[in-house]
Image (cartoon, rainbow, N blue to C red):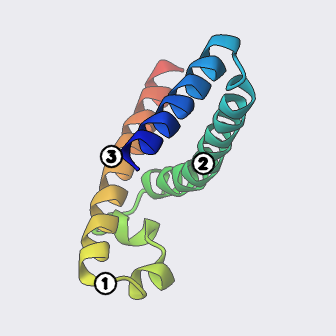
Amino acid sequence: MLVKERSELKKMAANAKNRLKFGSYNAKQDNVINYLEYGNIKISREEEILYRKVTEIIESNECIINPIGRLMDKQLYEEMSQAERLKYVLELSKTYIRLQTKYFQERHST
């Protein structure tokens, strides 16, 4: 039984080596890259929406006490557990600070 398992392992290793040697993995790798690019595009769209909201908050000339609350998806927030809520607020805070910095850098560079 042990000999059979070793020979199977050797076959699998040889197949993997051949795939690397002859480049048959490239098609799968291209699919992974396309999937990652799609993820970046999706994140970019979400950030673009948040960036518009941050711009509105900054340019509103109001004294805003809770900008994170304005960016928050309240329906999503209500459905989360306490731990998920904390993580969501912290991530949203980091995003707000990053987008606020981006806003001021763009305004000062022009």
The residues bearing labels 3 and 2 have C-alpha atoms spaced at a distance of: 14 Å
Image side of residue 92 versus residue 76, left or right = left
Pair 1/3: label in front = 1
| Looking at the image, residue 17 lies above or below residue 47 | above
Identity of the amino acid at label 1? Ser
Identity of the amino acid at label 3? Ile
Helix, strand or loop at disc 3? helix
The residues bearing labels 1 and 3 have C-alpha atoms spaced at a distance of: 24 Å
Pair 2/1: label in front = 1
- Please give the residue where the numbered disc 2 appears in the rendered image: 48
Residue 11 in sight in this render: yes
Image side of residue 100 versus residue 107, left or right = left
Identity of the amino acid at label 2? Glu
- Please give the residue where the numbered disc 1 appears in the rendered image: 81
Residue 25 picture location, percent across and down = 67, 26
| Picture quadrant where residue 62 is located | bottom left
The residues bearing labels 2 and 1 have C-alpha atoms spaced at a distance of: 27 Å
